[in-house]
Image (tube, helix red, strand yellow):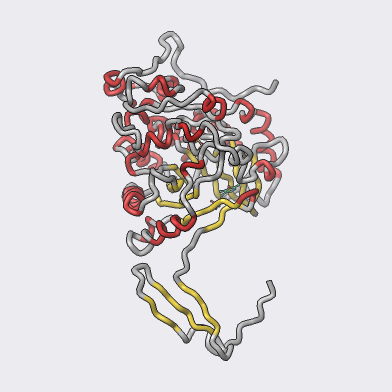
Amino acid sequence: MPTVLEIKPVQAAAHPATKLLTRAELDAYDPRSESWQRQFQRRYTHHSELKGVLKGLEDVNETVYGKFAVAVTPYMAQLMDPNDPQCPIRLQYLPSHFEETKPGFATLLDQLGEEGDTIPGTSIVHRYPRRVLFLVSNTCATLCRFCTRKRMVSQPAGSVHKEQIEASIDYIANNPDIEDVLLSGGDPLTFADERLDDILGQIRRRAPHVRFLRMGSRMVVQLPTRVTPELCAILEKHRVQMLNIHINHPKEITPLLRERVKMIQKAGVMMGLQTVCLKGVNDNVATMRELFMQSIEMGVRPYYVYSTDMVEGAHHFVVPHRRMLELYEGLRGWISGPAVPTFIVDGLGGLGKLPIIPQYVTEELLPDGSGTTIKCRNYAGKTVEMPGLGLGFALPTQSN
Ligand SMILES: *Cc1c(COP(=O)(O)O)cnc(C)c1O
Ligand code: SF4
């Protein structure tokens, strides 16, 4: 059997970390008071463990656990509204009856078709020219009910073995065309510092052709104390140029998160934000405006808003495409330009990321074919026609 990478708790197991089962215990808990590994051990892994902490908890049946595990850090539980089952953080992390059955979605565990683009023997998804997605871990600090990688995240069969990591680094080292490596998972920050140091160091040493080294992590948001001076020194040493975090609602932005984001930024790492468009969580203009403005306030540039993928147990989060266009229109022009991300739908079966862009400019052929009229509509709905553009040139016949 290949060795599965394990998360090593730093402290001795003499005093095993216990779960915080009452409201009083949870309220009294200070996430800064102990190592991130110990907080990791205190995660709630069954909804019943939250009964003493949250009111109005849904009693889902056990079939849910066979499909996707539950894991919630104490810090994340502190952010949940104890009285409101519709709390945007509860909706993201607590299992619901919607996950119990939904025929038709069951076969779509890999809707993005990532398996088909995975290089055999590695955990590298090589879909686009010149850049690769390197899935290093199959664990996250807190598990999102809408996770697009349910096929591997928290599944024993999805474990990334040491041999695969080595083969992945070989692949990157042996392909001089690869100039951009994105470490993701799962969450790369679930690894111990030494392991991360080793992987990043090997990429930098053995693949000098890699110009851009970036990471995606939600742990910064779910367990901010994972960000330590030691971790930041590793990011700086290996010149990790970008770290994307994943936030779906302004409630997830706290003083502790801001403090740790600042530490990463001081290590010279550019930071971006990824968001999933989720029904009931953030599918309204006011929430999105607030989220993206708070994000640029802390110097984190909104990058992508993804549509919810049609993975099993996530159908109740899906926001229609048309609504996503409206949400975009509620941002562009209305808030600071740098606060407006690109909206993305991931094409079924490996088509990849497709931008969802409302039409602001349309082109019409002049009746005599001598050029085009550009019809423009601004963010507030004012329109103008610009007949000059394209004048004097007959449009080339379209061939494809
Ligand atoms: C998202 C993704 C990337 C990175 O795409 P960018 O648009 O460059 O951020 C690379 N590979 C795969 C397979 C991806 O899904
Ligand atoms: S953080 Fe990302 S990979 Fe992890 S459970 Fe959530 S969506 Fe899935």
Q: Position of residue 350 (x, y in %)?
A: 64, 49
Residue drawn where x is 48% and y is 38% of the image: 217
| Quadrant into which the C terminus falls | bottom right
Q: Position of residue 92 (x, y in %)?
A: 42, 37
Nearer to the camera, 293 or 314: 314
Q: Residue furthest right?
A: 120
Residue drawn where x is 32% and y is 35% of the image: 256
Q: Position of residue 264 (x, y in %)?
A: 40, 40
Residue drawn where x is 46% and y is 40% of the image: 236
Q: Is residue 67 above or below residue 331?
A: above
Nearer to the camera, 105 or 390: 105
When asked about the image quadrant of residue 59, the answer is top left
Q: Is residue 340 visible?
A: yes
Left/right placement of residue 11 relative to residue 132 reads left
Nearer to the camera, 238 or 218: 218
Q: Is residue 228 visible?
A: no
Q: Is residue 281 above or below residue 360?
A: above
Q: Is residue 21 above or below residue 204?
A: above
| Quadrant into which the N terminus falls | top right
Left/right placement of residue 13 relative to residue 200 reads left
Number of disc labels: 0
Q: Residue furthest top?
A: 14
Q: Position of residue 380 (x, y in %)?
A: 34, 68
